[in-house]
């Protein structure tokens, strides 16, 4: 932390603003030491995450949409369910997901990660995975998986939806992501951000763009929790989507350079399109601003290093 004080002395950004942007993320980024039972739950959750037997036709898994080798997204406009139906929402990354204060796109009451995982397992209109007793029985027939279940959840007798969602949540809670932005703020790493990205950071926090008014906290959106407690509430803003006007959670911008397409319905294909959208004046609640081509490139450089 000695380097932090030197970095703060060299920056024109207020200390309180740096705290709002993300100084605490690397301090809490590790999931922490886990006991033996928790480790088994994480191992079980990782296996179940990629197991097609969770789906009604045994062809689809969590990893079909949240692809581990693609920043846990599928790069589709909206997700596709196990039966081929288009869903309403774009697939969000799961990196740092467990650190968010709320997990629902439009429901601020979903504050438990295991509860959130029951939704894709059980949603039926349209079906996402379609987990049902048949799928539970298929998992129970797997001797190795059953043995791991007994180590992870000693009192369990079957792979019911509650157990599966708890195991998945244990695994997702291990998914962490940091970047040069954190090194720049916390490790006295002047090269954590390029010179262009530093100019973009100045634009990001400026009164002119007011990006940081919504995208703040260690995750730059989505609120923030540590030790199971929400330290910064998730922010929900009224936005027009296909179903009408809904209160939609402001998403985290972590790894945003790798998680296209964007918006809750995936309608914007790339980050330049996002900047153009917010300069268009289409969202009346947001300040109107205009960036020069160079300023746009600077802000994009910052976003791509998050």
Image: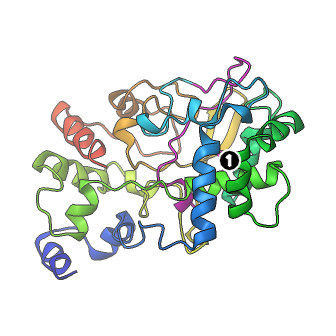
Q: Nearer the viewer, residue 90 or 275?
A: 90
Above-or-below relation of 274 to 224: above
Please state the horizontal and vertical placement of residue 109, each as a whole percent of the image: 74, 58
Residue 130 in the magenta stretch? The answer is no
Q: Secondary structure at mark 1?
A: helix
Residue visible at 61% across and 67% down? Answer: 38
| Magenta range | 78-106
Q: Residue 92 lies in magenta, yes or no? A: yes
Q: Which residue position is annotated with label 1?
A: 144
- Quadrant position of residue 246: top right
Residue 47 percent location from the top left of the image: 60, 45
Left/right placement of residue 286 relative to residue 6 reads right
Name the spot of residue 125 as percent of width and height, x first: 82, 28
Q: Residue furthest right?
A: 133
Q: Which residue is painted at 51% across and 37% down in the image? A: 283
Outermost residue, front direction? 143
Tell me which secondary structure the magenta stretch mostly adopts. Answer: loop
Tell which residue pokes out farthest to the top in this image: 84
Task: Choose top left, top right, bottom left or bottom right for residue 134.
Answer: top right
Which residue is rendered at x = 72% and y = 18% of the image?
85
> Which one is nearer the viewer's eye here, 54 or 191?
54
In the depicted structure, whether residue 17 falls above or below residue 6: above
Where residue 24 appears, as percent x and y from the top left, is 38, 71
202 and 158: which is toward the camera: 158
User: Quadrant of the image for the N terminus?
Assistant: bottom left
């Amino acid at each position: 932390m000695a380097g932090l004080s030197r970095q703060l002395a060299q920056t024109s950004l207020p200390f309180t603003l740096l705290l709002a942007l993300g100084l605490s993320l690397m301090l809490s980024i590790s999931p922490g030491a886990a006991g033996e039972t928790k480790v088994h739950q994480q191992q079980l959750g990782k296996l179940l995450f990629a197991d097609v037997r969770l789906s009604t036709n045994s062809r689809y898994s969590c990893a079909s949409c949240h692809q581990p080798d693609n920043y846990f997204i599928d790069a589709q406009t909206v997700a596709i369910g196990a039966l081929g139906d288009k869903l309403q929402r774009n697939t969000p990354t799961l990196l740092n997901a467990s650190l968010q204060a709320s997990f629902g796109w439009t429901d601020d009451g979903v504050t438990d990660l295991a509860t959130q995982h029951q939704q894709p397992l059980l949603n039926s209109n349209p079906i996402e995975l379609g987990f049902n007793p048949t799928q539970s029985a298929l998992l129970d027939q797997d001797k190795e998986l059953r043995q791991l279940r007994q180590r992870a959840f000693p009192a369990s007798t079957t792979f019911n939806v509650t157990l599966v969602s708890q195991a998945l949540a244990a695994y997702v809670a291990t998914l962490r992501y940091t970047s040069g932005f954190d090194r720049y703020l916390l490790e006295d790493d002047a090269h954590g951000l390029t010179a262009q990205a530093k100019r973009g950071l100045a634009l990001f926090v400026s009164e002119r763009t007011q990006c940081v008014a919504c995208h703040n906290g260690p995750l730059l959106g989505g609120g923030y929790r540590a030790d199971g407690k929400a330290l910064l509430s998730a922010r929900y803003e009224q936005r027009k989507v296909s179903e009408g006007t809904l209160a939609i959670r402001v998403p985290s911008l972590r790894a945003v350079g790798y998680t296209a397409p964007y918006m809750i319905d995936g309608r914007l294909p790339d980050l330049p399109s996002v900047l153009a959208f917010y300069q268009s004046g289409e969202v009346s609640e947001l300040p109107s601003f205009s960036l020069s081509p160079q300023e746009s490139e600077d802000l994009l450089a910052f976003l791509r290093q998050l």
